[in-house]
């Protein structure tokens, strides 16, 4: 396989595909066989095998199971490589768990179903866009292409006309079609990118067509990937599938009966365009963003300057009998005593809006739009301004600020105000806001530049809050500490702002106003309540950050009467936390992520009026939103095949039960053991469904991207603990990061993008799976490197060819007992060690490390063994055959096709499938001493080669000795029997410092070292510290070798003689000595010899011989 190395974010180009094609041929053969043999269809033990009364947890004692699920994909397109990354985690865990049983015992029933999510707005919204585009461009969008062609011709003419213009002047060109779309594609173009023929796209104007088009493609893509999915249990969501619809209606009714669903007013992210709440899965951007609550401060304009009066007059606005307020949004109402002015931006055009009762608000239209959906204005949804006024015109007007100690205040400019945050009007409290303090100083010092009267900015800061850390004037202290000079020092100001808020809120005390002496966190809500009660403030909400709906509407916050799920209720939250801490999360970061979400997550809107889904059981005019019908769908997987045999619930399942028979009582019988129910379903069928649920539930591992922790996955925990008894609470959850492609973000527009099918077509399933496994396992973002996929093709093909050759010539291989050969024993031991390491990493879902141990290191061990034996013809027959079998099985969870080929067609075990063979385990306990001895010989051989190459480098100087490559050499190994006394001495000191937790303090370390020893001891100490980060203290501080160094060297003497790279070895001698002595002993003759004064001997310690190479 030849591949050109790509730049970052550039697809790899394959130049030869013969090896890939051979592997794909194998993959297709076994995918077909697995489907025909129904290998992945997994059932619970039957009620004929075990009485119906036996519960699932009892059954699992003798019939182990593993139930894994990934967040079911949304059916608005084909699966892409990012989906494939999450899918691969479910695949690898299912593959491993199928094999995770002891040979001779009952195989584990590992279940992996996959459904298709269709609920919500995205499909309906996209279908509506297609309908509009059909009206614009015709059934096959011919008018679009005609217009595009016409514009192209026009542009060509314009280019000819402008050919004589000044070419030194740069002119950016942008196609008109792109200008019209604002850089975005039409919906039909997005669908076209999914390999849908143009003439078929008009069908996507019907949202139902999406539900029938993409699920079969998803199934096909997953099968081609080698997926171990039990497709009998697949379903689509929404009321199109009457069985799933019934299940969701039951679960929602159950949640309401349990008091988890409530009705009332609540602030929610809302799309004015769609006329409904915009929940996470309805968003184009801003997932996870919620409402941010502010206190809206009404700052009255008391005296208008001439410019304001002119604007009012020009717009026929008569202020008589009216009050005009600048409205500021603040998170710190308790600081309002310290106001010294009010800021507006000269760069913002504000609106004057009718707020009712003779009051008018000056604010941005965006902010007033939020207000008019929060019962703060006369008419819901009306946000047209009476007039517009630029912030510059307001500067200098006199104001009255609520609670302010200073009474004569002005409107002043602040250029850093953002129009898309808050109201565009900012209160100024220089005592506690670093931004305000710096801006006031800047206005005072540059009053002429800002065209203001300097006295307007010469207002004394009023101390409001005292903290022990920053005193009475927190902002001033922080600005001086951080040396902030200007309002443009954004980074430092952000640090100061965070520090001021945290210290003030958690450790501050009020020193002014009605609540002097109270802690700020106690006084804050009281001051806020007083302001609201006096009519000088109100509660105002807006999105925490920008949220765009799928219909391309910038969302607001609306106060809605609605049904909501009461997430965050204290008792319920406590149970959710209990469940979380009882689960396997596979990483501390995942646990912390859930803990953070459980800390802040509150009630969640349950319904919408637009989109696809299940109708609210008690109000059919409303739809259940997409995250609320996706909480416990894994329970439905357990019996879906009993209910229907297609994705849509149109074809009856194994039990031939009709949708209308699935009453709430029936669901309660299955899931909650409700007895004596009224139903016409025969008892045996009910028992079969209950058996399937109770055997497979709970879910052992839910697999998803980390972006679903703030919603889907947390809802999953909440709903399970609400409905089910503890024995059915979730067993585990695994969150992964996002996937980069070739070290760059995946993007269709840049071409750095693959669908799952495209990557499988390009590299084959096994090579793609290996590259996915090698991409990373943590919650941090991973990277799919195409070079790894390309390299995997060569590695797998070479393994296949090599294994075929070995088995073909197996009768020519060495036989006999392996106990007589050190390297036979060592290879067997190394295989055992790597098998156990691979098993451990699979069990912990560390697939990158499982791949390293089970493929890369396993093959390296084989290569070393073959090499050290002098070639394949000298290896031990039984060991190399065990290697081939073990290699295929270690690889099976990740690359099942090549594994199956090796077991079936090379080893001839045709009655078995790697999907159900027990995962290999060590044949005997791993011998640490043998492992260390083998690593010692490898390391010693490397050191001999390094010494050889250094000796061959030309040296200058009068006494320089150069090794002659043309002459043979003698190698002398100087093996130290003891450590130097100084090392023993300082090792004891290092141990004492380590136990006293002062080893990381170099000042303390240096006080323990004598001056004359400093140069050699500090590197020694650094080496010990480095080892302590990777090894246990017991191993590091006990330097006794686990093996007999002299015995191993004697055993491997002939191997060491031939390990040089360039020179011919005449003889290899071994001299042993005690550190500190000047004489040693020849290991072969027993003669005493003088030790030469060379650095190699001085550096020698047990386990690290000194090496000297000389010409004969």
Image (spheres, rainbow, N blue to C red):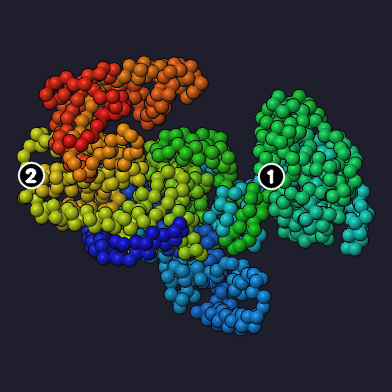
- Lateral position of residue 287 relative to residue 456, left or right: left
Closer to the camera in the image, 245 or 436: 436
Q: Quadrant of the N terminus?
A: bottom left
Closer to the camera in the image, 1010 or 4: 1010
- Lateral position of residue 280 relative to residue 40, left or right: right
- Lateral position of residue 970 relative to residue 841, left or right: left
Closer to the camera in the image, 670 or 974: 974
- Disc 2 is placed on an element classified as loop
- Confirm whether residue 933 shows in the render: yes
Closer to the camera in the image, 833 or 629: 833
- Disc 1 is placed on an element classified as helix
Spatial distance from mark 2 to mark 1, Cα to Cα? 74 Å
Q: Residue at x 30, y 55 (%)?
A: 792
List x then y, in percent, for residue 561. Answer: 65, 51
- The answer to the question of whether label 2 and label 1 lie on touching residues, with beta carbons closer than 8 A, is no
Q: Residue at x 36, y 56 (%)?
A: 787
Query: Could you tell which of marks 2 and 1 lies nearer the N-terminus?
Result: 1
Quadrant for residue 1060, please give it.
top left
Q: Residues within 10 Å of mark 2 (few under 14, many from 20)?
A: some
**Residue assigned mark 2:** 814
List x then y, in percent, for residue 692. Answer: 32, 48
List x then y, in percent, for residue 134. Answer: 55, 76
Q: Residue at x 59, y 63 (%)?
A: 551
159 vs 859: above or below? below
Quadrant for residue 494, please give it.
top right
- Confirm whether residue 334 shows in the render: no
Query: In the image, which disc is placed on residue 490?
Result: 1
């Amino acid at each position: 396989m030849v591949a050109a190395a790509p730049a970052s974010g550039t697809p790899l180009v394959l130049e030869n595909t013969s090896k890939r094609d051979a592997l794909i041929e194998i993959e297709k053969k076994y995918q077909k066989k697995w489907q025909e043999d129904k290998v992945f269809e997994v059932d619970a033990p039957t009620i004929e095998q075990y009485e119906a009364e036996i519960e699932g947890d009892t059954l699992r004692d003798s019939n182990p199971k593993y139930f894994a699920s990934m967040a079911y994909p949304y059916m608005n397109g084909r699966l892409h490589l990012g989906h494939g990354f999450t899918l691969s985690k479910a695949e690898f865990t299912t593959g491993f768990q199928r094999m995770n049983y002891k040979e001779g015992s009952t195989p584990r029933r590992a279940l992996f179903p996959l459904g298709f999510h269709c609920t919500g707005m995205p499909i309906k919204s996209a279908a509506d866009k297609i309908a509009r585009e059909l009206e614009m461009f015709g059934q096959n969008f011919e008018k679009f292409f005609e217009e595009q062609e016409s514009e192209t011709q026009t542009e060509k003419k314009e280019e000819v006309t402008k050919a004589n213009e000044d070419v030194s002047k740069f002119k950016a060109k942008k196609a008109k079609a792109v200008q019209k779309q604002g850089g975005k594609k039409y919906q039909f173009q997005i669908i076209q990118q999914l390999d849908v023929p143009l003439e078929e796209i008009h069908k996507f104007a019907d949202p139902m067509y999406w539900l029938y088009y993409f699920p079969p493609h998803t199934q096909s893509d997953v099968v081609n990937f080698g997926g171990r999915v039990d497709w009998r249990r697949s379903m689509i969501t929404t009321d199109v599938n009457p069985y799933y619809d019934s299940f969701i209606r039951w679960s929602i009714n159950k949640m309401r009966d349990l008091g988890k669903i409530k009705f009332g007013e609540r602030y929610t992210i809302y799309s004015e365009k769609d006329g409904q709440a915009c929940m996470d899965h309805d968003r184009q951007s801003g997932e996870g963003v919620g409402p941010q609550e502010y206190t809206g401060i009404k700052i009255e304009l008391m005296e208008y300057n001439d410019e304001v009066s002119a604007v009012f007059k020009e717009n026929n606005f008569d202020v008589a009998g009216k009050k005009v307020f600048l409205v500021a949004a603040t998170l710190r109402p308790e600081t309002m005593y310290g106001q010294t002015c009010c800021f507006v931006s000269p760069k913002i055009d504000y609106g004057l809006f009718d707020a009712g009762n003779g009051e008018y608000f000056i604010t941005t239209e965006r902010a007033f739009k939020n207000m008019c959906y929060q019962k703060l204005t006369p008419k819901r949804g009306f946000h047209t301004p009476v007039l517009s006024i630029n912030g510059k015109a307001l500067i200098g007007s006199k104001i009255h600020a609520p609670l302010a100690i200073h009474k004569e205040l002005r409107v002043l400019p602040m250029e850093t105000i953002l129009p898309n945050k808050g109201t565009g009007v900012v209160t100024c409290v220089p005592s506690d806001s670093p931004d305000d303090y710096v801006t006031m100083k800047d206005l005072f010092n540059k009053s002429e530049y800002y065209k203001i009267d300097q006295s307007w900015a010469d207002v004394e800061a009023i101390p409001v809050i005292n903290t022990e850390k920053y005193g009475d004037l927190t902002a001033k202290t922080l600005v001086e500490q951080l040396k902030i000079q200007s309002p443009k020092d954004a980074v430092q100001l952000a640090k100061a702002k965070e520090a001021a808020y945290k210290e003030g809120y958690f450790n501050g005390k009020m020193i002014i106003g009605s609540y002097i002496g109270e802690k700020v966190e106690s006084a804050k809500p009281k001051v806020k309540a007083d302001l609201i009660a006096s009519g000088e403030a109100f509660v105002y909400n807006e999105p925490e950050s920008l949220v765009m709906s799928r219909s391309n509407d910038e969302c607001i916050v609306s106060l809605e009467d609605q049904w909501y799920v009461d997430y965050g209720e204290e008792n319920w939250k406590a149970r959710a936390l209990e469940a979380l801490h009882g689960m396997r999360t596979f990483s501390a970061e995942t646990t912390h992520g859930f803990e953070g979400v459980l800390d802040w997550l509150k009630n969640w809107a349950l319904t919408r009026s637009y989109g696809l889904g299940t109708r609210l059981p008690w109000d059919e005019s409303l739809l259940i939103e997409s995250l609320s019908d996706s909480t416990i769908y894994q329970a439905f997987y357990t019996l879906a095949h009993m209910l229907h045999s297609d994705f849509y619930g149109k074809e009856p399942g194994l039990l031939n039960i009709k949708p209308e028979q699935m009453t709430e009582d029936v669901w309660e019988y299955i899931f909650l053991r409700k007895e004596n129910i009224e139903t016409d379903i025969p008892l045996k069928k009910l028992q079969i469904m209950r058996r399937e649920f109770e055997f497979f539930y709970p879910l052992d591992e839910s697999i998803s991207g980390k972006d679903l922790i703030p919603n889907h996955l947390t809802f999953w925990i909440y709903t399970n603990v609400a409905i089910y008894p503890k024995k059915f609470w979730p067993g585990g959850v695994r969150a992964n990061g996002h996937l980069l492609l070739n070290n760059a973000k995946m993007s269709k527009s840049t071409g750095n993008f693959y669908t799952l099918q495209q990557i499988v077509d390009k590299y084959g399933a096994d090579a793609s799976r290996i590259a996915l496994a090698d991409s990373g396992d943590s919650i941090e973002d991973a990277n799919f490197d195409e070079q790894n996929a390309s390299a995997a093709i060569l590695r797998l093909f070479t393994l296949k060819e090599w294994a075929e050759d070995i088995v073909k010539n197996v009768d020519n291989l060495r036989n006999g007992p392996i106990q007589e050969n050190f390297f036979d024993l060592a290879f067997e031991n190394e295989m055992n060690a790597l098998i156990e390491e691979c098993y451990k990493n699979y069990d912990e879902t560390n697939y990158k490390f499982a791949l390293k141990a089970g493929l890369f290191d396993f093959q390296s061990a084989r290569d070393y063994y073959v090499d050290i034996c002098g070639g394949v013809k000298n290896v031990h027959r039984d060991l190399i055959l065990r290697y081939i079998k073990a290699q295929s099985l270690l690889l099976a969870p990740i690359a099942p096709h090549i594994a199956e080929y090796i077991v079936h067609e090379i080893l001839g075990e045709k009655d078995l499938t790697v999907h159900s063979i027990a995962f290999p385990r060590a044949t005997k306990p791993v011998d640490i001493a043998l492992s260390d001895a083998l690593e010692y010989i490898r390391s010693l051989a490397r050191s001999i080669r390094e010494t050889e190459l250094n000796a061959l480098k030309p040296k200058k100087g009068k006494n320089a000795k150069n090794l002659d490559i043309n002459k043979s050499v003698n190698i002398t190994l100087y093996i130290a029997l003891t450590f130097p006394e100084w090392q023993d001495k300082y090792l004891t000191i290092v141990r004492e410092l380590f136990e006293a937790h002062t080893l990381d303090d170099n000042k303390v370390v240096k006080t323990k070292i004598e001056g004359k020893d400093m140069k050699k001891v500090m590197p020694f100490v650094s080496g010990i510290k480095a080892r302590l980060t990777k090894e246990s203290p017991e191993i590091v501080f006990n330097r006794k070798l686990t093996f007999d160094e002299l015995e191993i060297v004697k055993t491997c003497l002939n191997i060491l003689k031939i390990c040089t790279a360039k020179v011919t070895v005449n003889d290899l001698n071994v001299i042993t000595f005690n550190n500190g002595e000047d004489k040693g002993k020849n290991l072969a003759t027993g003669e005493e010899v003088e030790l030469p004064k060379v650095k190699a001997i001085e550096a020698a310690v047990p386990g690290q011989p000194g090496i000297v190479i000389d010409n004969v």
